[in-house]
Image: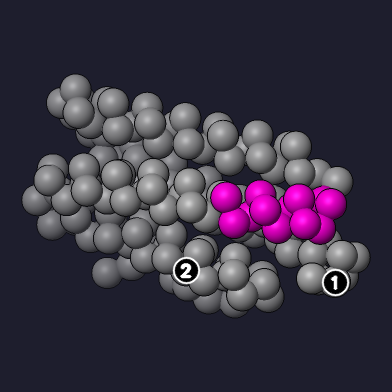
């Protein structure tokens, strides 16, 4: 089962960003499957840890690209990344404290944030990189 289909609406045309986004969608779909199977406690913890690690890697890639391209909206884009990381840390802390329903909160947040971020914030970066900076 998938919550988010990897399709052309998520492809930005910058291979190093698209590959990372596809991986993030895969992580999101694993979270969804764990929740649907009602056997998600251990797997969700592992997914949140993986998500933290992978997003930090991915955000580093995007931020290096923004620096290389001299992207004018880099500061706001980087701030969005920091907000996301704080949210994931919050979910991890809630999960580790045994809070009920945190899995649903994680899933809703990830789906909404990831899709919106790719289709809006990252799309602007990709357009700038390919059309203006020509990287």
Whether 110 is drawn above or below 24: the answer is above
Q: Which residue is tagged 1?
A: 134
Give the main secondary structure of the magenta stretch: helix
Q: Disc count in the image?
A: 2
Q: Residue at x 81, y 58 (%)?
A: 69
**Pointer 1 local density, CA inside 10 Å: few below 14, some 14–19, many at least 20:** few
Instruction: Name the residue tied to disc 2.
Output: 22
- Residue 28 location (% of width, % of height): 36, 57
Can the viewer see residue 112? no
In the image: residue 54, left or right of residue 41: right
Residue 32: give x, y in percent of width and height: 28, 56
Query: In this rendering, would 50 be left or right of 117?
Result: left
Name the image quarter holding the C terminus.
bottom right
Q: Give the range drawn in magenta.
A: 60-71
Between the C-alphas of marks 2 and 1, the distance is 23 Å
User: Which residue shows up at 29% across the image and 44% down it?
Assistant: 49
Give coordinates of residue 101: x percent, y percent.
23, 33
């Amino acid at each position: 089962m998938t919550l988010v289909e990897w399709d052309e609406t998520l492809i930005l045309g910058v291979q190093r960003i698209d590959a990372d986004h596809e991986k993030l969608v895969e992580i999101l779909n694993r979270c969804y499957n764990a929740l649907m199977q009602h056997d998600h406690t251990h797997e969700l913890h592992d997914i949140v840890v993986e998500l933290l690690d992978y997003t930090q890697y991915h955000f580093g890639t995007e931020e290096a690209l923004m620096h290389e391209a001299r992207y004018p909206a880099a500061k706001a884009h980087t701030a969005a990344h920091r907000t996301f990381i704080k949210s994931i840390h919050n979910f991890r802390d809630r999960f580790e404290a045994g809070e009920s329903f945190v899995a649903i909160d994680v899933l809703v947040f990830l789906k909404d944030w990831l899709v919106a971020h790719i289709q809006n914030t990252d799309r602007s970066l990709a357009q700038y990189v390919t059309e203006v900076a020509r990287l």
